[in-house]
Amino acid sequence: ETKPVLIIGAGVSGLALGNFLLREGIGCVVFERRSREYVEHRQRAGVIDTRATRAFRKRGLEDRVGDGVPTEPNLGFRVDGQPRPLGLSVEEHREGRFCPQQVLVRNLISGFRQEGGDLRFDTEVTVEDHENPRVRLGDGSIIEGDFIAGCDGSHGVTRAAVPEDRITRHTHEYGYAWLVILAEVPAHQQTLMAIHRRGFAAQFGRGPQASRFYLQCPLNDTTEDWPDERIWSELGTRFGEPITTKGAIVEKQLVPLRSEVLSPMSHGRLHLLGDAAHIVPPMSAKGMNLALYDADAFADALVHYYKNDDPGLLDAYSDTRLNDVWNYQAFATWFTNTVHDAGDPGDRGEFHHRVARADFERLYTSGTANRLLSEFVAGLA
Ligand code: APR
């Protein structure tokens, strides 16, 4: 008798995996400790790249991201206050979608439920046994499964279920933070990214009436250092033009930029996906996409296991994913360092600043350099 796959967490990775498995006819249960309301309103990522879009399409689930606006052919850079749009040379890049995370999450929840999926909100679980997969619910009941999918984010219980000496955590701190602002301002274009001596700044649309703004700032700043007026004026300076439409700032948060990779990603019948296994800095726009690549690969591995009675892809899951994760971690590190150091290099100094400028300018002058960036942006590198 086949037991279900126990999916812990209903963020992007757990919900995508649930949708993929249901579509493939593989039994699963998704447990989420938060409420549906909470999960559906959590705003974070906003770009689904070409490779992740294709993972939905190949299973006939493109409607989950379907009404997303295609990503633009240019990245809207401004350098020292001047517009410097950067064209991307890889055509397939246009298959990607602007899709705010909460829109994707809502679509994945309603699609999963409509097709009869078992998704339990307000249900915090602990891992009883990860070798003979069993989880315990809040009421003390135990559920057995064939596998555990750890989709429970960077503070989750699944990574903690593995003995410490069996798992290695690789971490990197970038040395600065982003002040992340959510404001009721229509995006004036899809993206705006400012490279400036005073530090990096960006604006990304999040639906018709909301934008996220980002300001590079020192690690020890607090939100009290950033009253609304200072935010608007600093954005204006770094963008090189004043912000004319100012809307209510509904959220302010300081996020230190960091990277993390856990190795290996598989422990017997427990497999880690998404933020539970890796964190990339937001500049790369790969956090949500890596979670989707993981869900795609893990679903394929399970299909292979159940349909062909072959554990080959499952056994290879950790190594295959880690190769890819390090590839995107390398991209994320390079891109993050480049756009920050090309503006304000901080303690890293003038030498790094000049090198970062050269790295950045090459994206305009070298077709080869541009092509590599474009492939990473599309998720095809
Ligand atoms: N029991 C049940 N649910 C849990 C438990 C637990 N013990 N621990 C954590 N969770 C839930 C959290 O409440 C959360 O909803 O797991 C979910 C993990 O979701 P995310 O942190 O969003 O992680 P993930 O789905 O891997 O997201 C990957 O996608 O949208 C982006 O910004 C997001 O970078 C992130 C990426």
Image (spheres, rainbow, N blue to C red):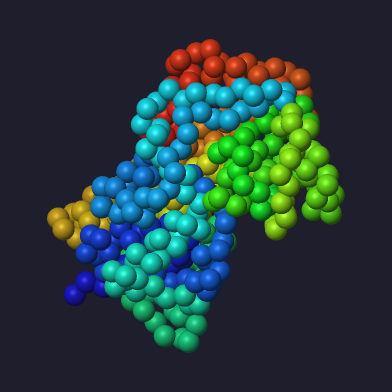
| Residue 78, picture quadrant | top right
Whole-percent x, y for residue 82 in the image: 69, 23
Residue at 68% from the left image edge and 28% from the top image edge? 195
Q: Residue at x 46, y 29 (%)?
A: 73
- Name of the residue lying farthest toward the front: 244
Compared with 156, 205 (above or below) is: above
Q: Is residue 150 visible?
A: no
Residue 330, placed above or below residue 126 = above
| Residue under the image location 42 percent in, 29 percent down | 375
For the question of whether residue 60 can be seen, the reply is yes
Instruction: Name, please, the residue furthest toward the top.
Output: 365
Horizontal side of residue 218 vs 195, given as left or right: right
- Compared to residue 367, the image places residue 1 above or below, namely below
Work out which quarter of the rendered image holds the N terminus and state it: bottom left
Number of numbered callouts drawn: 0
Residue 179, placed above or below residue 115: above
Whole-percent x, y for residue 356 in the image: 65, 22
Closest to the observer, 271 or 239: 239
Quadrant of the rendering where the C terminus is positioned: top left
Residue 27's spot in the image, x, y percent? 26, 69
Q: Nearer the viewer, residue 31 or 362?
A: 362
- Residue drawn 48% across and 21% down? 370
Residue 243 is drawn in which quadrant? top right
Q: Is residue 27 left or right of residue 378?
A: left
Horizontal side of 191 relative to 274 (left or right) equals: right
**Where's residue 222, x and y in %?**
81, 52
Is residue 84 shown left or right of residue 27? Answer: right
Q: 36 or 333, which lies in front? A: 36
Quadrant assignment, res 230: top right
